[in-house]
Structures are given as C-alpha cells and as structure tokens.
Image (spheres, grey):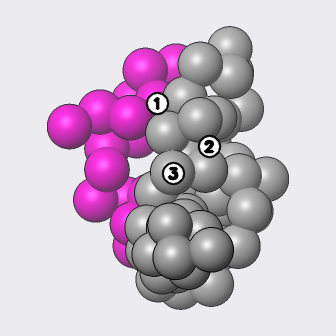
C-alpha cells in the first residue's frame, strides 16, 4: 500500500527505514522522501513509528 502519495512511498519502504533506525517522521522524510510533500501522510508515519517501536502497546497500558 502506498502511504505517501506525493513521493509514491509504500508501507514496506517506510517499515524498512524504521527498522534501520528512523525514529521520527523527519528521519523517514530524509531517508525516503515520505512526508516531505503535502503532509497528509504524517499521521500514518507517526502511527507506523509507534507500532514498529512498540509504543502503541505502552500507551494503551497506561
């Protein structure tokens, strides 16, 4: 699935960048361009970061 329509970046690319150490939407933008256009995908980037890093579970437990 394409997450960033402006840059044509799929979910798999963003997941790979997070696994390589991207820790913020800005890191993802620098690595693959996602989030650098209109900004409509920034919420999705934040959600992916939280899920990949396990923060979503920690927030739900608190």
Q: Is residue 54 above or below residue 60?
A: below
Which residue: 52% across, 76% down? 61
Q: Which residue is mark 1?
A: 4
Indicate which disc, 1 or 2, sits on the residue closer to the N terminus.
Answer: 1
The magenta stretch is: 1-17
Q: Quadrant of residue 49?
A: bottom right
Q: Which residue is mark 3?
A: 47
Q: Quadrant of the N terminus?
A: top left
Which residue: 31% across, 50% down? 11
- Residue 14 magenta: yes
- Residue 5 magenta: yes
x and y percent of residue 36 in the render? 71, 32
Marks 1/2 in contact by CB < 8 Å: the verdict is yes
Q: Quadrant of residue 35?
A: top right
Whole-angstrom CA distance, mark 3 to mark 2, is: 17 Å
**Pointer 3: residues within 10 angstroms few (<14), some, or many (20+)?**
some
Marks 1/3 in contact by CB < 8 Å: the verdict is no
Q: Quadrant of residue 51?
A: bottom left
- Say what secondary structure mark 1 lies in: strand
Query: Which of pointers 3 and 2 indicates the residue nearer the eye?
Result: 3
Res 40 label: none
Q: Is residue 13 above or below residue 1?
A: below
Whole-angstrom CA distance, mark 1 to mark 2, is: 9 Å
Res 33 label: 2
- Say what secondary structure mark 3 lies in: helix
For this orientation, the residue located farthest to the right is 26
């Amino acid at each position: 699935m394409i997450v960033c329509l402006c840059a044509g970046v799929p979910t798999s690319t963003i997941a790979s960048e997070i696994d390589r150490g991207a820790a913020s939407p800005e890191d993802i933008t620098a690595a693959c361009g996602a989030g650098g256009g209109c900004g409509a995908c920034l919420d999705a980037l934040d959600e992916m970061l939280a899920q990949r890093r396990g923060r979503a579970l920690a927030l739900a437990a608190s």
